[in-house]
Image (tube, grey):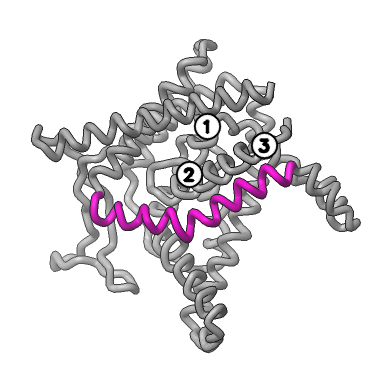
Amino acid sequence: MPTTRSLKDRIFLVVKGLGMGAANKVPGVSGGVVAFVAGFYEEFIYSLQKVNKKAFMLLFNGRFNSFYRYINGKFLGLLFFGMIVSYFSVSKILDYFLQHYELYVWSMFFGMIIGSIYYINKDFHDWSYKSISALIIGILLGISISFLDPAKENDHLLFVFFCGMISVSGMTLPGFSGSFILILLGNYVLLLVDSVNALYDTISDIFSGDFSFVDNPIRMRLLKVLSVFTLGSVTGLVTFSHILSYVLKHFKSITTASIIGFIIGSLGVVWPWKKTIFKTQEDGSFLIDSRGEKIIQNYERYFPEFNSETYTAIGFIILGILIVLALEWYGQRTNKSHA
């Protein structure tokens, strides 16, 4: 499964990591879709499931080169490097556009998901009673999840570890948005905004020679939360990869149909035209979290009027579809060059 890569391929792999990292941070969008459409999903799952007992034996015995080759280290290293960079660069740019051009961002991702459905479905021909049932179940689960109300924020470390395990599923299961699951669990802002910003600020302080953050209990608590969340994510990533590797090998048709269903169901989450509904108290005032921000309850979706803004949004939907088609073209080209 591992392949020899040119410099161009390695650069594009980092770019794909940037795409996965950005997608994982957007509620309703799955980084696994990027891997699936760009043509490296199976290698991604294969490489992750090589992080097993044998890999740890090689590592503990000091056979670092053998460990690196065994887990397809160059592939995973470049991909995760792109994801990490994304969390401190691309994702921050994405946050800005979500704040100022929310409709157009959601429209582009809506188009990307439509393109992903086309991509995955076009080569799938094994439709049967079982696969159709799996498709329907996937759609219903995806739709049901999109209408659930978020829970309250919870920074208990065991719950944070659980959040890490669940949220990382978006990287391994296309159509299952880990960031949206974090919203439902109440910890999206805590884990993907506050904690990441705390790490960014801490790194900046260290480079500037300022170590006063060690006396800041809020900063240290956020760093501890991020560490536990990362540990849970790594645990979930390896665990889910082993499970998915097994089901892809033994139940590929049902799994693919379920993935298509999840992605179709997730269209409800990223529907561009929606209004945010905030939680309120009995007196009608908004519930406020520890950061002084209004707590989101869910979204009210609606059909838009046809005006210039709507036409622009439709243009971004088409752009999203074209991006996926371009990724598909590049993925096919890459696979042919490695054949």
Q: What secondary structure is the stretch in magenta mostly built from?
A: helix
Residue with the mark numbered 1: 38
Q: Using the rendered image of the protein, determine whether residue 140 is visible from the camera's viewpoint.
A: no
Q: CA distance from mark 1 to mark 3?
A: 17 Å
Instruction: Name the foreground residue: 151 vs 321.
Output: 321
| Front tag of 1 and 3 | 3
The picture places residue 225, in percent across and down from the top left corner, at 53, 69
Query: Disc 3 residue type?
Result: Ser
Residue with the mark numbered 2: 19
- Quadrant of the frame with the N terminus: top right
Residue 18 vertical placement versus 207 (above, below): above
The picture places residue 91, in percent across and down from the top left corner, at 42, 54
Instruction: Please tell me the numbered disc located at residue 190.
Output: none
Residue with the mark numbered 3: 6
First to last magenta residue range: 72-101
The crowd level at tag 2 (other Cα within 10 Å; few <14, some 14-19, many 20+) is many
